[in-house]
Image (cartoon, rainbow, N blue to C red):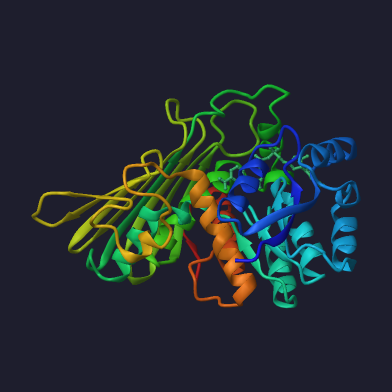
Amino acid sequence: MVALKLGMVGGGQGAFIGGVHRIAARIDGCFDLVAGAFSSDPARAHASAAELGIDADRSYADFNEMAKAEAARADGIDAVSIVTPNHLHGPIAEAFLAHDISVICDKPMTATLAQAESLVAAAEASKGRFFLTHNYTGYPMIRQARQMVAEGALGDIRIVDVNYLQDWLSEAPTEDNKQAKWRMDAAQSGGGAIGDIGTHAYNLACFVSRLRATSLSATLSSIVAGRSVDDDARITLQFNGGARGHIWASQVAIGNENNLTLAVYGTKGSLRWAQENPNVLLFTELGKASQIITRGGAAANSAAMAVTRIPAGHPEGYLEAFATLYREAADVILTKDLSGATIGIQDGLVGVRFVDACQRSSSNGATWIDLR
Ligand SMILES: NC(=O)c1ccc[n+]([C@@H]2O[C@H](COP(=O)([O-])OP(=O)(O)OC[C@H]3O[C@@H](n4cnc5c(N)ncnc54)[C@H](O)[C@@H]3O)[C@@H](O)[C@H]2O)c1
């Protein structure tokens, strides 16, 4: 595969997920990072670029300037990664899509529904593609589960339950906690736990089950005193086809680091998976002993093997799952074939609609909201 030229907005010194994206973009040799506007602070942006070996003339202080300059170059970037706080995803993505540059954006797609709708229109008018990094969809055992559900191994789906539990916001964060600061500001994040990890949970439920919620009832709470965004979200879901489900997303559940778990129950069997032990999937057929399916092992199916890099027993995890999304984005950009498992603009819109519906439900006493 020819390496595509990648730019990045955000992800400068002291940032979290930008570094993960840079590793993921390189794992399969699909992208070379050649340009960036790495920080809101110009000095830090340029210092970060220098540290990353980016040529000085491709280090930008402003993302609009970067989009314009890169589009004008013969060797301009093919795609840009957006790894800034949520309220900037929409404006940055639109700036690059306007120049037909593809976008690989972290979740949630935008901070508001109005931004999401505007971005969908911008993506429709662009030759650039839009990809959303719901990275948990890239795990081999999640691909295995999705294929097993599609093949009917579970029968008709009855229940889909996803919990995403963390504890890093169990107390008011210190002033210097960069990651917490913008997340605690609704104008920048668009919501608390519901946007930050609830969107991952809902995306995973839909990705594996291939169902969509038709209605939901949500209770969002701000448990830590003085907090203006939610830190604990409990949602009851009704899916198309009659299945029901629950999501519990919490950032104040002490003892949990990134405890994301998925359970899908059907008329014939069930699947259970946990992100902190991602190389195994538990499959139980009614009346039989449970089976442990392992990544790369004898029972791994074609969907899992397609995204497996190393033999069974050598762990793959978070970085490789992210890299799978980068590889699939590169495939789509190069071949224009959209038949793969990539998460795109419509999934992003579904996620932002989910957050919006949860917020409306919760502020009306957990009333049921119709999503059809
Ligand atoms: N998929 C995942 O697992 C995952 C995990 C963590 C974060 N995220 C998402 O990634 C995004 C970033 O989160 P984070 O934790 O890395 O945040 P962070 O605060 O660590 O980093 C944000 C970066 O954006 C930069 N930035 C802000 N305004 C900018 C501007 N105008 N121009 C250029 N750069 C700008 C900041 O300077 C900083 O470098 C968020 O949308 C978050 O939801 C996803």
Where is residue 289? Give x, y as percent: 11, 49
Residue 45 horizontal side relative to residue 135, left or right: right
Quarter residue 333 falls in: bottom right
Residue 11 horizontal side relative to residue 316, left or right: right
Where is residue 259? Give x, y as percent: 42, 37
Judge whether 288 appears above or below 184 on screen: below
Quarter residue 157 falls in: bottom left
Q: Name the one closer to the observer, 238 or 323.
A: 323
Residue at 87% of width from left, 57% of height from top? Answer: 64
Residue 195 horizontal side relative to residue 118, left or right: left
Where is residue 181? Give x, y as percent: 70, 33
Judge whether 308 appears above or below 370 on screen: above
Quadrant (top left, top right, bottom left, bottom right) of the N terminus: bottom right
Quadrant field for ligand 1: top right
Residue at 49% of width from left, 44% of height from top? Answer: 318
Q: How many marks?
A: 0
Residue 349 visible to an observer of this rendering: no
Q: Residue furthest left?
A: 287
Residue at 86% of width from left, 69% of height from top? Answer: 74
Where is residue 268? Give x, y as percent: 17, 63
Q: Name the one closer to the observer, 193 or 274.
A: 274
Q: Name the one closer to the observer, 23 or 91.
A: 23
Quarter residue 76 falls in: bottom right
Residue 184 visible to an observer of this rendering: yes
